[in-house]
Amino acid sequence: MKQGTLKHAVILGTFCLGFGLLLAVTDMVTAKDIAARALEDKQNSLSQVIPDSIHDNNLVADSVAMKDDHGKDITVYRARKDGKVSGVAYEIYGSGYAGEIKLMMGVDAQGNVLGVRVLAHHETPGLGDKIEEKKGDWILRFTGLSLGNPLPDKWKVKKDGGQFDQFAGATITPRGVVSAIRGGLAFFAAHQAQMTEVN
Amino acid sequence: MATQYRTIVRDGLWDNNGVFSMLLGMCPTMAMTTSATNGLGMGVATAVVMAASSLLVATFRNRITQEVRIPVYILIVAAMVTLVDLCMNAWMHELYKVLGLFIPLIVSNCLPLARLEAFAAKEPVLPSFLDGLFMGIGFTIALTAIGAVREIFGSGTLFADASLLLGPAFKFMEMRLMSADMGVLMMILPPGGFLVTGLLVVGKRMLDVRAGKAIQMGGAHSAA
């Protein structure tokens, strides 16, 4: 009995060791490529909210860590032209119909929206997912707006008396996105110095 | 010998199909069949894992003792899944962005484990490899079929985004059959998965009855 147990342990241990080694080797081989892909993804999502024309630096390499108004750690990426900060991009969060909506927003140095894109969400397919750029142009309408344009009481969906269309059958999703963007702009206004300081 | 291989192929693709006959692997079946393309991608990833793990288990079948076989099988399946996950992330990144979230689900799929226990543990390497491969292809066919039905009725398209999965040459597969407004939303939500899977199981069994075959049920351990 004792010998049997030892034999099983050795067999199981050998398999664990063997496959552990196999995975370790695979991880080593793929790690560099995976890191490169992750960087490309980040660059892609940043280049959608910060136009290439306003910067000459590498956005991914120029970032500053901050805490947003809810105490969440966010990374602020900075666009610079000739060393001067011309815009920033950071993640903002809205509450949707089915959990959190994660967005990336770009803002220029004057506080105008350069672009907003949805990074991740769990909204209803066919109803709430029209916030994705792939599914419609709704998200593009925020480009060029700022905290004062439209006026604060119009920074809402139409149903709440504001100026932004909701979708047929989905009000909560656009409401969450609109308030996240308004919150993001207010965050920029409050922390502008810290976000754009040159160091 | 030739008849044995024919039986393996027929079992995997139709007679003992993982989804439509054995009703195994329901978790990825429900989660990943919101479109034909998603079903196809999940099916192919599962087929790769099944073929590789069947091959490995058959190779080591005389070394693995009865007492520790289940942990060893799970170890092998999990290692293959991780391998596929890492390689896809590194070298097929576009596809990974579509399927990545669901690759780890293959570990929770009981179809690979069932085939290891029922087949690869007892049979030589080549038949085991073929059994894993064709069970995987049968799974792919089932997932693609369920995905196609749900996608047509739910979003009005067929094989949308197939070019993301298979490369730009497959753009021709992407079809729009009805306007998006005509889609029945329920079909791409979870209830649609149960409805379509159920109806397709009924359809398959009606075909089998018409062909005079005995209906196989829960046949995970049937002799191959």
Image (spheres, grey):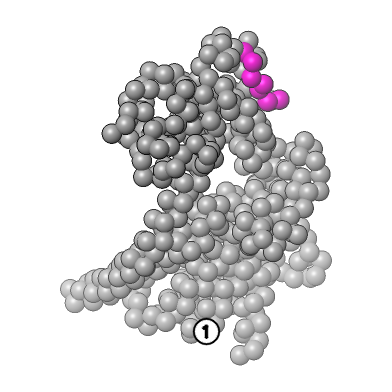
Depth check: give the residue in front, A137 or A195.
A195
x, y percent for residue B215: 70, 65
Residue displayed at 66% across by 33% down: A137
x, y percent for residue B87: 45, 64
Q: What residue type is labelled 1?
A: Leu
Specify whether A30 is left or right of B129.
left
| Mark 1, other Cα within 10 Å: few <14 / some 14–19 / many ≥20 | some
Q: Which chain carries label 1?
A: B
Q: Is the magenta stretch mostly helix, strand or loop?
A: loop
x, y percent for residue B19: 62, 60
- Taking B177 as reference, is A115 above or below it? above
Depth check: give the residue in front, A86 or A22.
A86
Which corner quadrant holds the N terminus of chain A?
Answer: bottom left
Query: What residue is pinned by disc 1?
Result: B126
Q: State the extent of the magenta-drawn residues as a range.
A: A162-168
Residue displayed at 32% across by 28% down: A197
Residue displayed at 20% across by 74% down: A6
Specify whether B137 is left or right of B67.
right
Which corner quadrant holds the C terminus of chain A?
Answer: top left
- Taking A5 as reference, is B201 above or below it? above
- Taking A40 as reference, is A83 above or below it? above
Whether residue B181 appears in this view of the structure is: yes
Count of marks overlaid on the render: 1
Depth check: give the residue in front, B159 or B60.
B159
Depth check: give the residue in front, B117 or B38.
B38
Q: Is residue A163 magenta?
A: yes
Specify whether B26 is left or right of B177.
left
Whether residue A119 appears in this view of the structure is: no
